[in-house]
Amino acid sequence: MKTSVKALMATSAFMCAFNAMADGRLEGRVSDVAGSVYFDGAIIRLKELKMESSTKDGGRFSFNSIPAGTYTLTVDYLGAESVQRLVNVVDDKTTKEAVQIGSDVTSMENLIVVGQAAGASSALNKQRAADNFVSVVSSDSIGQFPDENVSEALQRIPGVFIERDQGEGRFVGIRGANPNLNSASINGMNIPSPESDRRSVALDVIPSGLLEGLEVRKTNTPDMDGSGIGGNIEVKSLTAFDRDGMSYNLSAEGNYNDLESEVSPKVAGTFTNVFDVGQGELGVAAAISWQDRDFGSETMEGAGEWENDLEGSGYRGSVKMEQRDYVINRTRLGAALNLDWRPSDTSEYYLHSLYSHFEDQEYRQRAEYKYDDGNLDSIDGESALWTDAEMERNLKDRFEEQKITSVVLGGMNMSGDWTYEYSVGYSKSQENEPDYHGSNFTAKDIDMGYTSLGEAPDVFAGDEAFIASNFEMDEIEITNNYTQDEMFTYKFDITREMSFAGHPGYIKFGGKITNREKGNDVDTQLYDDFSAAGDPTMDAFSHSTVDYSLGRLGPAIDQGLIDDFIDSNVAGSGTTFQEDGILGEAYNESVVASARDYLIEEDVQAAYIMSRVDINDLRLVYGLRYEGTKVKSSGYDARLIEDASGDFGHSIEEVNYDQEYHHVLPSINARYRLTDELLLRAAYSETIARPSFGDISPSPEEITIEDDELTVEAGNPDLDPYESSNFDLIVEYYPGDIGVVSASLFYKKIDNFIFAADVSDTVDSSVYAPGVTISDSEIYMPVNGNSADLYGLELAYTKSFDSGFLIQANATFTDSEADLGLEPGASRSSSTELPEQADTVGNLVFGYETGPFSLRLSANYKSKTLMELDLGEEENDTFADDHTQIDFSAKYDFSKSMQMYFSAINLTDEPMYLYQGSRKYNSQYEEYGPSFVLGFTYRNF
């Protein structure tokens, strides 16, 4: 395969030796009439030569190797009148043209310069000019929504949905495909994830104020990474050449969370300037954003513990319920520094850097109703009562710190028909969870149950369950967890402009090497015998009750008091607080839990060759990409074992895995201009998606053998990557003003799709417990399915009216059918929908702008989604309920420089709800409350 890739490169270089073109060069820049704002995405044409380009990097465009002569230059930009002029090109010289578009009015009155219409216009122009099918969010549009981070800004794009954590957007899915099937890059550089189980970074760590724009590329070209079945997300940070001269922007705001009644500050600033350094220009762009947010949530969880025919009763019931209350402080610090040096018109060099520091302090109070430890007294379809059951109260004190550092050094040189681009990148992500404390107290012989089911079941218990002195200290966990993900990337691209039988185009080839290493280090200590401390009860650590609106949660565990006890008595105590010492469960489980370390090394080598050609109104972009992947992983197979006498032990074995796979990925994108307003696009591509690191972890999360019962939660290092063949057909209509109507049909044939499942019925338990008699087992792991079909329709409409109104609407409808690959006679059907595939995703936005006022009301919708499969019982599949969030924003410009803004987020207090099989059976219900933001911005542009 390497030989064939070298042959492709040699062939392309040979072909580029022919069809040389003349030496004249034309370059220019497109701005408003005042010359203060520059426009990307404008379509530039030389009519006589049938050549087309588009502006980028601050409104710049260029044509190389133009024969000497006079030509008609046209500039088209949605929202402005077309501009046409004559230009004269001379051999061996560069002709420069400055083009102004738009109305001759002040910037504050120009619809394509500021406001909602300007944001929509910028995004639509970039989308129209692209070679492949993309959706764009410009920096102007990002500022119009109350979005706090990149993930939330992306949710407004057609076909995009987000996964939320504590009400905030984190991971991004595209066209119904789960987030693991997408790739994300920042300034062209892939960013590793600080989280131990993830491959791609959660984009909530990047504040929206650091951005110049976002692109979601839904069809692939050969010069893009092949690992994006759903699509590729490109995050572009600010550069000085995006603006003219010096610019700055300062903002400050307060965010009020209704659930916690807390006000949280946020400040942000950006600065850009271009300096004359004697030899060319140096652009400096810097941005910083800081937020300290206090908020929380309230949760009711069925904990995935629903059983059919519970204890032979003939009714479906839960064996466990949990009430949870979260109090969270989340701090974000983001900074970017981008240096761009342009010593001449044909060369540039850059250093782009990004730093993100994310801290999350979480306190969680939990009351766990352990019904299965009692005696079932009565049950029907809506209620149940147990006697002599057990309740556990728990405080989780978890501090999480994530750091991301990314640096890219690169350059571009042009020589005649040739363009050389190259870059070296380094990025490092870290997650540190130091000194995690989990404290459990239990009380027994309590009558408890539930009186209704649904989103938030009504649970009850006897009064003794709410008296702190009835709860004895049962277990304390102290854990330190550290994850590091480090990546080096080396990339080059070479482009040769040329003519194909009189049709302008280019050939491009390049390569990329990515070396990645991800490791996880865990140290856990469990303690379960506190007789040496007098067997303390919870009343020694509780002086208040939990404020909880979903029911009665009861007494709270005081974080300060329990931390003092742990630090003074438990930490570093050896086996003093571990029952039965080294023969006990706590000691051996600590050893096993601390053996979840792993190290995964992944090397990816890629090469491609591609071509673009314009044949009258048809543009073709086609080629091949090769990607070879080698994975080495090492970890520990650690098991907790209980023998017949009740003594505990453990076994730990080092395990090593090697995996290697190669792919040749063809693609073709066609764009046909039926009229100046109507575009038809078609595309075919083959892509892959590598398994997440959590899925291929060589160290099982848990292997426990107790009373002949086996529990396993493990990764699967032998997983194959997803492989997909993708077909797209798109129609886009641009009526000439600021607006678009588009429709896209897409189909994806996916092989080896991965899903998490309970495989107890299909996996031999002796693999995890050799020589041990097992009466019952629960084995959870990711597995490959056979194949899946994903298809859908994406619709989008944007219209800006002269009256000041703006409407944006989009909806994506998807369906899928997946073959799980189960054997005949399995307890469930082998046919299902793709896990984490949303059937319907939509946005509706109403905007209005008049004078200094700007108003925007937006709604975001995601339909029911299958989240987890149970291979034993289909009724235990877990679903996320549909979710509709409504946000509002308003802005008032006191002047060109000063603006006040107000935002209301999650106006209707939309909860998150997961259920098992039917909406009646709660898996997790969580409320966050609405938030309100008031802020001010001062800028000089």
Image (spheres, helix red, strand yellow):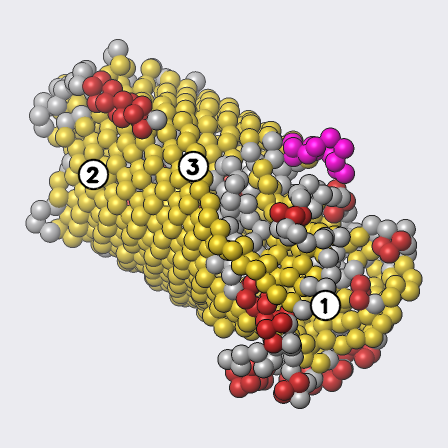
Dot placed on the residue nearer the N-terminal end, 3 or 1: 1
Q: Nearer the viewer, residue 178 or 813?
A: 178
Q: Earlier in the sequence, mark 1 or mark 2?
A: 2
Residue 189 position, x and y percent, is 34, 45
Label 3 to label 2: alpha-carbon separation:
33 Å
Which residue is more in the foreground, 36 or 822? Answer: 822
What residue do we see at 64% from left, 76% from top? Answer: 580
The correct choice, above or below, for 395 with respect to 492 in the image is below
Q: Is residue 568 above or below residue 245?
A: below
Q: Nearer the viewer, mark 3 or mark 1?
A: 1
Boundaries of the magenta span = 819-831
Amino acid type shown at disc 1: Ser
Q: Main secondary structure of the magenta part?
A: loop
Q: Mark 3, mark 2: which one is toward the viewer?
A: 3
Kindly indicate the quadrant of the structure image that contains residue 286. Answer: bottom left
Picture quadrant where residue 615 is located? top left
* Mark closer to the chain start, 3 or 2: 2
In the rendered image, which residue does mark 3 sit on?
660
Query: 10 Å neighbourhood of mark 1: few (<14), some, or many (≥20)?
Result: few
Label 2, on which residue? 412
Q: Position of residue 742 (x, y in %)?
A: 51, 29
